[in-house]
Image (cartoon, helix red, strand yellow):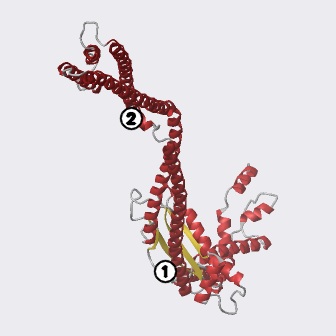
């Protein structure tokens, strides 16, 4: 049973032992804590300070809605910011700033230009501010320097560079887009003019056989066919008249050879009667097909009137002498021969008119026959023209929109960067953060104090408690002699405890005051 109790006591946390260590070793603990903190705190005042000046740049959206004027520049703000940052952080730009503000001057300043540029790049920081849907709404520009006024000036220069470079980049992109669309528009205009020339040339070559002229061609063809039919009817009538005139002339010659007709009347009257009969029969035939205003009807009527007049004149003329009779007998024959000649002229004119009408009919018939192929070719040309025109109209619309967007960028009405507040003049250094150094110093001092206490306890071979003594004995202790302390011993212990608490208070007060001073001075 005693062994079991001793094992249980050994496994339990020995609070009295550690409390005794604190009483004996608090000086060993407090001194390393204080000097560890003092070392780190002093280091924070020795290290070179760096002040950071920053400003917030707001990304303002275009004042004109996109439904009115669509922007013609790259809308990826993050890519544009990266491009602008690379331009601003270029060697030429950074060296210009260092020369303008006389940076890195002194014995400890970087000697070469490359070192100056690298130091500038390390001191510059650009942080993006994202809103909803990871959309960039602003970004912060900061610069660190040993002098707060220099940090403010450099930050102001960088801010102006960002604002001006954004305007410049957007204007250049917008103008470049407009120029590109204008060049494409010129090519489209030339292609459209070429297509128009092809269509005009094709229409000129096939004038009269175009699909739009089909109705007029059909109407003209129908009219020509009607005229051809009329001419053919008139030609047939003229040919009948020619046969008739030829028969009359033959009869007249035969009658004059005998001197009298069969019924004893003058042969001229008989011939005229036969002619009138033929003309009246022809008039009846024409009247059944045409109106009285038709030219052939009026012509036959005029011939009938002339023939009747000749008959009446022949009957009324006295036969006083044989010479007069002979003259009167030859007059109708001459008239018939004249009519026959006029009839032959008419037949020739009719035949020429028919030939001309047939040629024109063949021409229009050929146009109508060739029209499907011409319509297909013209449709292909028009399709190419419409495509060229649609491309030209689309580019013209884009060019006008791009020109409006370029004008908006030139008037600085597009997306732009606005500095919300001027670059701050830092009053506390960004590095070193002395309050953090104090906290690190306290943590380092505590670790060092624990290490010192552990080393002292490890090297101390004295026994300081009953448990340590009992652990060295091989037998159980039957009785104990209590410790008898003199008043001087008690007084010495009290003084030591008081000095310990006083030292603890002093260390704590010094650490707190040093941390407060670091916080107030930055």
Image: 93 above or below 173: below
Left or right relative to 200: residue 233: left
Q: Is residue 185 visible?
A: yes
Q: Indicate the secondary structure of the residue bearing disc 2.
A: helix
Q: Against 200, is 497 above or below?
A: below
Residue denoted by label 1 = 424
Instruction: Please say if the residues under marks 2 and 1 sit with CB atoms less than 8 Å apart.
Output: no
Residue 76 position, x and y percent, is 54, 60
From the top left corner, tell me how far across and down residue 460 is, in percent: 78, 73
Depicted 468 relative to depicted 504: above or below: above
Q: Residue at x 75, y 64 (%)?
A: 468
Q: Which residue is rendered at x = 65% and y = 91% of the image? A: 105
500 relative to 188 in the view: left or right: right
> Which residue occupies the extreme left position in the image?
316
On residue 308, the disc is none
Name the residue at 76% across, 62% down: 470
């Amino acid at each position: 049973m005693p062994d079991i109790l001793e094992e249980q006591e050994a496994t339990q946390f020995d609070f009295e032992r550690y409390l005794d260590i604190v009483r004996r070793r608090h000086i060993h603990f407090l001194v390393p804590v204080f000097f560890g903190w003092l070392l780190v705190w002093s280091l924070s005042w020795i290290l070179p300070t760096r002040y950071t000046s920053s400003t917030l740049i707001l990304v303002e959206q275009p004042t004109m809605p996109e439904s009115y004027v669509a922007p013609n520049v790259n809308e990826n703000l993050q890519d544009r910011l990266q491009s602008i940052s690379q331009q601003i952080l270029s060697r030429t730009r950074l060296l210009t700033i260092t020369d303008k503000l006389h940076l890195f001057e002194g014995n400890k300043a970087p000697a070469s230009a490359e070192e100056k540029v690298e130091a500038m790049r390390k001191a510059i920081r650009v942080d993006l501010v994202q809103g909803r849907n990871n959309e960039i709404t602003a970004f912060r520009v900061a610069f660190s320097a040993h002098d707060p006024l220099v940090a403010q000036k450099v930050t102001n220069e960088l801010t102006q560079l960002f604002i001006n470079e954004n305007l410049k980049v957007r204007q250049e992109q917008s103008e470049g887009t407009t120029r590109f669309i204008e060049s494409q528009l010129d090519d489209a205009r030339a292609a459209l003019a070429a297509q128009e020339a092809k269509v005009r040339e094709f229409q000129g070559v096939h004038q009269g056989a175009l699909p739009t002229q089909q109705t007029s061609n059909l109407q003209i063809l129908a009219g020509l066919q009607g005229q051809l039919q009329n001419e053919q009817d008139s030609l047939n009538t003229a040919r009948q008249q020619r046969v008739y005139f030829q028969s009359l002339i033959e009869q007249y010659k035969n009658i004059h050879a005998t001197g009298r007709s069969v019924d004893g009347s003058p042969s001229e009257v008989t011939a005229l009667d036969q002619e009138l009969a033929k003309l009246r029969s022809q008039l009846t035939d024409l009247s059944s097909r045409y109106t009285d205003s038709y030219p052939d009807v009026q012509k036959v009527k005029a011939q009938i009137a002339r023939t009747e007049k000749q008959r009446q004149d022949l009957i009324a003329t006295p036969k006083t002498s044989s010479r007069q009779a002979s003259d009167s007998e030859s007059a109708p024959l001459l008239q018939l021969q004249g009519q026959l000649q006029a009839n032959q002229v008419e037949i020739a004119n009719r035949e020429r008119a028919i030939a001309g009408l047939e040629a024109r009919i063949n021409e229009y018939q050929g146009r109508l026959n060739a029209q499907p192929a011409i319509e297909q070719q013209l449709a292909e040309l028009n399709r190419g023209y419409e495509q060229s025109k649609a491309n030209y109209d689309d580019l013209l619309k884009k060019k006008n929109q791009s020109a409006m967007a370029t004008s908006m960028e030139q008037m600085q009405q597009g997306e732009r960067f606005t500095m919300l507040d001027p670059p701050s003049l830092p009053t506390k250094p960004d590095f070193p953060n002395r309050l953090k150094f104090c906290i690190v110093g306290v943590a380092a001092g505590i670790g060092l104090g624990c290490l010192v206490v552990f080393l002292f306890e490890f090297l101390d071979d004295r026994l300081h408690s009953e448990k340590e003594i009992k652990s060295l004995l091989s037998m159980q202790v039957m009785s104990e002699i209590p410790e008898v302390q003199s008043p001087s011993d008690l007084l010495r212990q009290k003084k030591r405890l008081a000095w310990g608490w006083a030292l603890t208070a002093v260390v704590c007060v010094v650490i707190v005051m040093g941390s407060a001073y670091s916080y107030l001075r930055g």
